[in-house]
Image (cartoon, grey):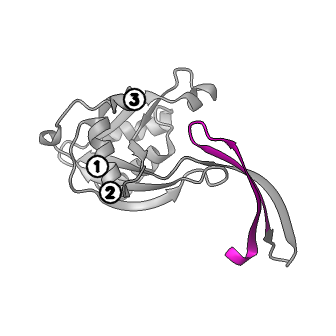
């Protein structure tokens, strides 16, 4: 496929928070003709996400925080309930998700299990997200969580019964794609 795609021009439109590029490319169609298109791609780096679950209590750990894009798209409060997640920066996915779990939720997990990886918005964002699950118990709680102060995070940690979290998908209380995928994975694979 690489031979069939040729980048003609790349222009950086913004390098403020992340990098937004305008790319002109051509590719070979199935009928043998070449098509030239221009698209924008947002590069924010790759990330990792995790669902913490407690089999005995039948609970999961989620977070709630303000998300500006949801606010400007009609989410009245801008608050979103999500699974813990973060950008890889220079870490591998496993180290990243262990660090993010402790920063955001206060739980120190050592054993994490990668379940899959997915592009979350491939039409416009370059990010691939690595999905993990890990069991937690109360003894793993080493701090209050809430996010990294230097990143100006303001995260509320939630412990919810799995059935309530699943119901919140149907009622609109949980609208985050990665979180829905993780909760459905947990139910499908009988983690809880």
The Cα–Cα distance between marks 3 and 2, rounded to whole angstroms, is 21 Å
Q: In terms of secondary structure, where does tag 3 sit?
A: loop
> Does residue 1 appear in the picture of this structure?
no
Crowding near the residue tagged with mark 2, few <14, some 14–19, many ≥20 C-alpha atoms within 10 Å: some
Lower sequence index among marks 3 and 2: 2
The residue that label 3 is drawn on is: 153
The Cα–Cα distance between marks 2 and 1, rounded to whole angstroms, is 6 Å
* Mark sitting on residue 52: none
Q: Quadrant of residue 6?
A: bottom right
Q: In terms of secondary structure, where does tag 1 sit?
A: helix
Direction from residue 143 to residue 178 in the image, left or right: right
Residue sticking out furthest to the top: 77
* Mark sitting on residue 98: 1
Residue sticking out furthest to the right: 33
* Residue span colored magenta: 1-26
Q: Is residue 29 part of the magenta span, yes or no?
A: no
At which x and y percent is residue 16? 60, 36
Crowding near the residue tagged with mark 1, few <14, some 14–19, many ≥20 C-alpha atoms within 10 Å: many
Crowding near the residue tagged with mark 3, few <14, some 14–19, many ≥20 C-alpha atoms within 10 Å: some
Please tell me which residue is depicted at 51% across the width and 45% down the height of the picture.
177
Q: Determine the main secondary structure of the stretch shown in magenta.
A: strand
Please tell me which residue is depicted at 28% across the width and 49% down the height of the picture.
98
Q: Are circles 2 and 1 on residues that touch, CB within 8 Å? A: yes
Task: Choose between 71 and 187: the one closer to the eye.
Answer: 71
* Mark sitting on residue 94: 2
């Amino acid at each position: 496929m690489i031979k069939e795609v040729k980048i003609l021009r790349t222009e950086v439109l913004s390098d403020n928070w992340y990098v937004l590029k305008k790319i002109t490319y051509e590719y070979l169609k199935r009928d043998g003709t070449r098509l030239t298109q221009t698209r924008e791609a947002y590069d924010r780096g790759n990330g990792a996400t995790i669902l913490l679950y407690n089999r005995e209590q039948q609970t999961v750990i989620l977070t709630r925080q303000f998300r500006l894009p949801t606010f400007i798209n009609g989410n009245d409060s801008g608050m979103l309930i999500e699974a813990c997640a973060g950008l890889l920066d220079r870490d591998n996915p496993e180290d990243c998700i262990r660090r993010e779990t402790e920063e955001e939720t206060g739980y120190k997990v050592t054993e994490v299990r990668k379940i899959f990886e997915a592009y979350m918005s491939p039409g416009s964002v370059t990010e691939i997200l690595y999905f993990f699950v890990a069991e937690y118990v109360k003894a793993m709680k080493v701090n209050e969580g809430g996010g990294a102060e230097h990143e100006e995070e303001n995260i509320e940690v939630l412990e919810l019964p799995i059935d309530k979290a699943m119901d919140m998908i149907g009622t609109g209380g949980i609208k985050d794609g990665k979180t829905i995928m993780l909760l459905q994975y947990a139910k499908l694979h009988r983690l809880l």
